[in-house]
Image: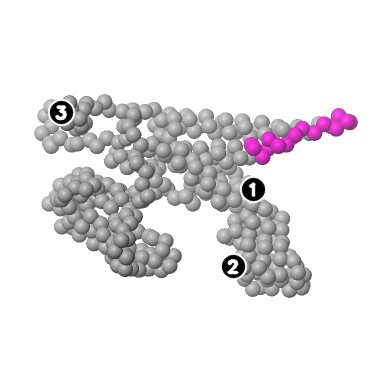
Amino acid sequence: MATLSALASRLRAELGDTGRSIYETFTGDGINTRFKLSEAPVDGATLVIKVNGSDVSTDVTVEEATGLLILDTAPANNSVITVTGTAFRYFTTSEICYYVSTAFTEHARTTVDSNGTHATLRTLPAVDEYPLVILASSLALYTLATDASFDIDIISPDGVSIPRSERFRQVMEIVQTRKDQYKELCSMLGVGLYRIEMGTLRRISRLTNRYIPVYLNQEIDDSSKPERVYLGSEIMGHSPMETTAQIYDILLYQGDSWSAEFDFPFDVTGLEFKAQIRTYPNAPATWATFTITTISTSETLSKIEVSLPRLATDHLPPRAFWDLQATSLSDPTYEVTYIRGKVITTQEVTV
């Protein structure tokens, strides 16, 4: 399972922008609250700032790109200020995460699994991770190239020449090399922006205007039940409709119990949650109703558990839909759908 932090670390390794520890000291004068580190950019989350041995890190504003520290209160005269942490060569942590997120949005725009579910960082196949990092590195190098483009050649009257624009040309050569590497990987692995598109031609019924189901090919002496193929997004199909609800597809095995925890960045006290499974949205029949339990609540983070017992999954169809709605106990007009998605059930063998 890919994570943003893991991909960010791999991107730093590709760029040669790994962190290095720093240690600096300053002397307070009772007036100045701004101190400039000799190295930048820095990781503000790792900085530990102490004044005469007392940790004041939470009372300091850090400009990560420039290495400037701004204390809320001016340290006393002759007080010793120590700073320890991590510095980088090119990019801050937020910039690295931005490049990874942008590369993921582009690389996985049409990436779906066999169930037609669009990939997220959590579900991104491992084979996509390295090409994604290569794409992110080319985005980061473009930023370095833009910075280098402002350098101009210096030629002095005595014949000394400093070709500062050479740095721009070198960076652009690296960018092109990375782009070629990304294109080659995508073409060979069948992923990303340069993957070779393959599709299955499907017939549409004249009577129902619906697709004819597609089944896996079988040998002539194979007497097993035909297995339905649920194709992903069509090459010339339409994009999913935009929605304010988060998409979460449930994968479960028929006859097994299932549960998952969901986080909400607010206090859910006073809200009543309800979730159901239906064959399709607004279907008259309900396949199952989830059990919802509030695990913890606070002003900044609440957790709820959504679960299904074993008996509730015994007769689920291979494909269905679900959503999670909340209503207010104090306001009868309030109702919000926070999560929706598909329910994909693998049919059981042992009963």
Counting residues from the start of the chain, the first of labels 2 and 3 encountered is 2
Residue in the foreground of this view, choosing between 86 and 67 = 67
Tell me residue 160's x, y (percent).
Answer: 84, 32
Q: Nearer the viewer, mark 2 or mark 1?
A: 2
Residue in the foreground of this view, choosing between 108 and 286 = 286
Q: Is residue 251 above or below residue 84?
A: above
Tell me the residue at 71%/55% (across/down): 38
Q: Is residue 349 above or below residue 298?
A: above
Q: Is residue 251 visible?
A: no
Tell me residue 202's x, y (percent).
Answer: 24, 27
In the displayed orientation, state which residue is furthest to the front: 333
Assess whether mark 3 and mark 2 are in contact (beta carbons under 8 angstroms): no
Residue 274 position by quadrant: bottom left
Residue that carries the numbered disc 3 in the rendered image: 207
Residue 54 position by quadrant: bottom right
Please state if 100 lies on the left or on the right of 38 as rendered. left
Q: How many marks?
A: 3
Q: Is residue 221 visible?
A: yes
Tell me the residue at 17%/52% (across/down): 286
Magenta span? 145-160
Tell me residue 40's x, y (percent).
Answer: 66, 52
Counting residues from the start of the chain, the first of labels 2 and 1 encountered is 2
The amino acid marked with disc number 1 is Arg
What whole-number distance in Å separates the C-alpha atoms at marks 2 and 3?
69 Å
Residue that carries the numbered disc 2 in the rendered image: 58
User: Considering the numbered disc 3 on the image, is that residue within a helix, a strand or a loop?
Assistant: loop
The amino acid marked with disc number 2 is Thr
